[in-house]
Amino acid sequence: MDITGLKIPHSYVVTPKVHSDDRGDFWEWYKFDQLAEVVGHPLDLRQANASVSRKGVFRGIHFAELQPGQAKYVSCPFGEVLDIVVDIRVGSPTFGLVETVVLSDKNRRAVYLSEGLGHGFIALTDNAVVTYLVSSVYNPQREHGINPLDPVLGLNDIANLELSLSPKDIEAPSLQQALEQGLLPTWEDSLARYEQLSVERGSL
């Protein structure tokens, strides 16, 4: 398994080694110890989610408030999606940066993003299945979103598809509006949270 950092600090793409023969494929899609060594602490798994989306569905951009925040380990066991990470941490050297990674049932990749980062994806095929391992249970009072069609993010035409969004995501504030409303985490608070997690959980 190869774990490579993205340009946005504290986000990673995970590429497993797939073993194939005439019976099919086998791969390790999540390794507790190897991820912990790279991230600095283990993923404290609290909830596992899955979604099925038709082609063109855009889910996101979502994030949870720090304390506890919600780290995510995202994969696509069937179909293909364009996974999206957005640095929404005010004061981060990459604030506002958007990175995309294709996840599919062919490349078997996953994406890990730490607490304080925004996340979403666009389904590139029908019946695209996405699984999420997350570090905290869903708390609607502490969940927020950024409008994925905010021109600042540059995602409107990224997949060359007719996009389908939920009313909630369409009505979400722009990145600038979320900043003005005080919804976004700060770089300093995010770093403090990562340090806290490293102390509490150790490297393994």
Image (spheres, grey):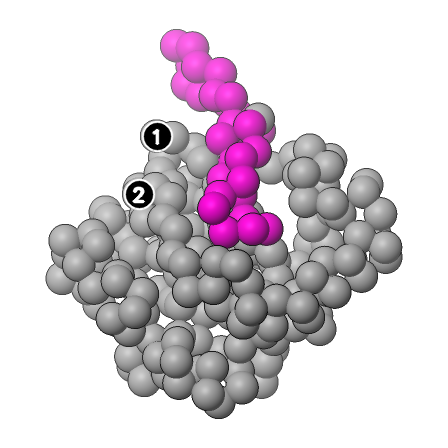
Question: Could you tell me which residue is drawn at 38 percent across and 44 percent down?
Answer: 101
Instruction: Give percent across and percent down for residue 126.
Output: 23, 50
Tag on residue 106? 1
Question: Could you tell me which residue is drawn at 67 percent across and 38 percent down?
Answer: 38
Determine whether the residue tagged by mark 2 lies in a helix, strand or loop: strand
Q: Is residue 49 magenta?
A: no
Amino acid of disc 2:
Glu
Tag on residue 80? 2
Q: Earlier in the sequence, mark 2 or mark 1?
A: 2
Determine whether the residue tagged by mark 1 lies in a helix, strand or loop: loop
User: Can you say whether 29 is above or below 156 in the image?
Assistant: above
Q: Which residue occupies the foreground of this view, 97 or 118?
A: 97
Question: Could you tell me which residue is drawn at 78 percent across and 58 percent down?
Answer: 195
Instruction: Give percent across and percent down for residue 147.
Output: 33, 75
Apparent side of residue 144 relative to residue 97 in the rendered image (left or right): right
Q: CA distance from mark 2 to mark 1?
A: 8 Å
Question: Could you tell me which residue is drawn at 60 percent across and 56 percent down?
Answer: 114
Segment tinted magenta in the rendering = 2-29
